[in-house]
Amino acid sequence: MAGKQMQARIIKHYPCDEESGRLLDEGDYYYVTVEIHGHKVKNYGDSYHERGFERAQAFIEGYAHAIGMTKGVSIMYSEAPVEDGQS
């Protein structure tokens, strides 16, 4: 893995306002998704019940360590609507 950079993303999922389509991101997110190199690999629950964001970050760090990549890990953060069937 030397010379390669791992690209990871943590996505916080929020419900949308039915009229405007705007994310309702003032409160707790419903769940988070971890993507590595564009592939969804793991979901964690909300902040209140499962501390999902922290667990997602730990998963990425642990995965990078397990594959011997101690440097070159890029984590992006974003928000998205709750996907059908995932609330």
Image (tube, rainbow, N blue to C red):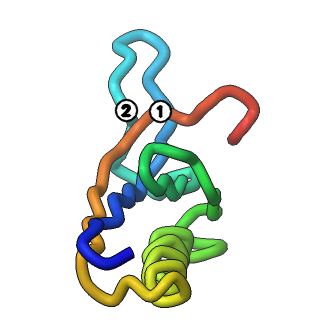
Q: Where is residue 78 in the image (x, y as percent from the top left)?
A: 31, 48
Q: What residue type is disc 2 on?
A: Leu
68 to 35, vertically: above or below: below
Q: Which residue is at the front of the view, 78 or 60?
A: 60
Q: Which of marks 1 and 2 is in front?
A: 1
User: Nearer the N terminus, badge 1 or badge 2?
Assistant: 2
12 to 24, vertically: above or below: below
Dot 1 and dot 2 residues touching (CB under 8 Å): yes
Q: In which quarter of the image is residue 52?
A: bottom right
**As drawn, is 72 to the left or to the right of 47?**
left
Between the residue at mark 1 and the residue at mark 2, the CA separation in whole angstroms equals 6 Å
SS at circle 1: strand
**As drawn, is 76 to the left or to the right of 18?**
left
Q: Which residue is at the front of the view, 54 or 34?
A: 34
Task: Give the labeled residue for mark 1.
Answer: 81
62 to 53, vertically: above or below: below
Q: Where is residue 65 in the image (x, y as percent from the top left)?
A: 46, 89
The disc at residue 23 is 2
Which residue is rendered at x = 69% and y = 41% of the image?
87
Which residue is rendered at x = 38% and y = 60% of the image?
8
Which residue is rendered at x = 36% and y = 44% of the image?
79
Q: What residue type is disc 1 on?
A: Pro
SS at circle 2: loop
